Image (cartoon, rainbow, N blue to C red):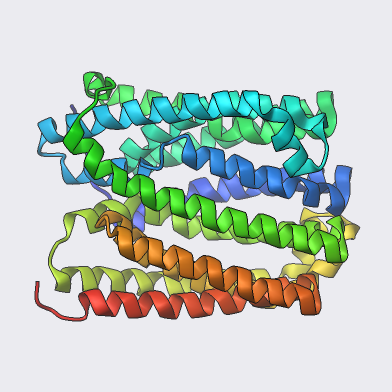
Amino acid sequence: MSTITKPTLTSTTLWTSTAVAIKLIIGLVVIKIFALNFGSAGLGQAANYMTLLTVFGVLSGAGILNAVTKFVAEYEQDPQRLQAILGASSLLIILVSVMLAVIGLMFTQPISLFLFQTADYSLTIQILALLQCLIALGNYFIAILKGQRQAKACAMSSIFANLVGALWLLFCLWIWGYQGALIGFACIPALILVPSLIALLKQNWHWQWLKPNFDLSASHILRHYMIMTLVAVCIIPTVYILLRNQLIESQGLSAVGLWQGLSRISDAYLQLLTTAFSVYLLPTFAKLSDKSAIQKEVKKALGFIFPLALGLALLVFFSRDYLIIVLFSPDFTPMSDLFGWQLVGDLFKVASYVFGYLWLAKAATGRYICAEIVQGMLLFGLSSYGIAQQGVAGATLGYGLCYMTYFGFCWVLFKLDYGSKKR
């Protein structure tokens, strides 16, 4: 296998920010077309489908993709252990993705009814059930590249998938309308399989290491990551679905569309930061064992993320009216009043990711699950109360208060674990 140069946080951020910037531009153009064609109600109706797409993307990787990144970094000098981990990972990913495909194909009508209150979207669900198998494989290869800290390869893969995927989405929208657009959204993450495969081929990767194989010791290690991911993918997406349904009952689909549009803006600019974290922080934390070194890395990451996230949030806030005009349609004008607390929540949410990556890297299952449960309880409790009192404005208020509190909770847990400089 060829020698791999390890990038710094700065170079990682540069490459990933470039890729995410391109993804951001493409995504916003697509959302603009979507908004013009279907309005805020159409975007609101698609919100739960987007959540299902995210959940399928995570579950199809058996919840172990972060573990793959960690162990590729940690065992780069121990081929035997790495091969055992990758063989077990391949087996788990194949089993889970095939199982999800079967479930998706068998229960398309109930899933369609749950998401859209109609069975008319059964074919869309069936196609998504099949595409998640390709998504799983592509994400697996990306996880390996992240473990090698190959920011450039990850970035180029993302750029290819988003460029080609956006063109295909627009074609599907033109031919099949609303459901075609939904299918197109699912195709974008599936397309990352092609460039990620090419990137590994260029490295003369040891493909025999990916042969599915059951290894008891490796499976025992991976189960911690499966549990952590299962908890995360069950709690937060479920909370959002419940909150959206509450908002539909109180204010209708248009209000959900406003919140979803705002969330799309948040997701877009936060990816400039979180993608770099997944490439740099996870393998970096995996290699550190000394408490003082971990403290230093966490403080460096927070010192890097807070000013950058604050700058981006202020830029979004002061350009919000322009963004609404450019990105959406006149239906979304009321969104302007919702940005304040949403951006406050974004700032503390992205900073909290630093602790999440630390716990993932250290397989701190108890800490991770505890934090996810607290996050879910805070988000549901505060946002549900806010929706009951103020509708969609209350949802953003609850979001902001949730992540301010959640960051403080994570900081306390971190100090309990790493407050001492002793090992």
Give left or right: position of 389 versus 104. right
Closer-to-camera residue (100/54): 100
Residue at left 62%, top 68%?
380
* Position above or below: 343 against 245: below
Closer-to-camera residue (367/150): 367
In the rendering, at what x and y percent does residue 21 appear? 56, 51
In the rendering, at what x and y percent does residue 59 appear? 48, 39
- Quarter of the image for residue 336 reads bottom right
- Quarter of the image for residue 80 reads top left
* Position above or below: 172 against 114: above
Residue at left 54%, top 65%?
376
Quarter of the image with the N terminus is top left
Quarter of the image with the C terminus is bottom left
In the rendering, at what x and y percent does residue 274 appear? 45, 57
In the rendering, at what x and y percent does residue 145 appear? 33, 37
Give left or right: position of 350 versus 358. right
Give left or right: position of 170 versus 77. right
Residue 324 seen in render: no
Residue at left 79%, top 56%?
257
Residue 118 seen in render: yes
**Count of picture labels:** 0
Residue at left 64%, top 58%?
240
In the rendered image, the residue lying farthest to the right is: 330
- Quarter of the image for residue 386 reads bottom right
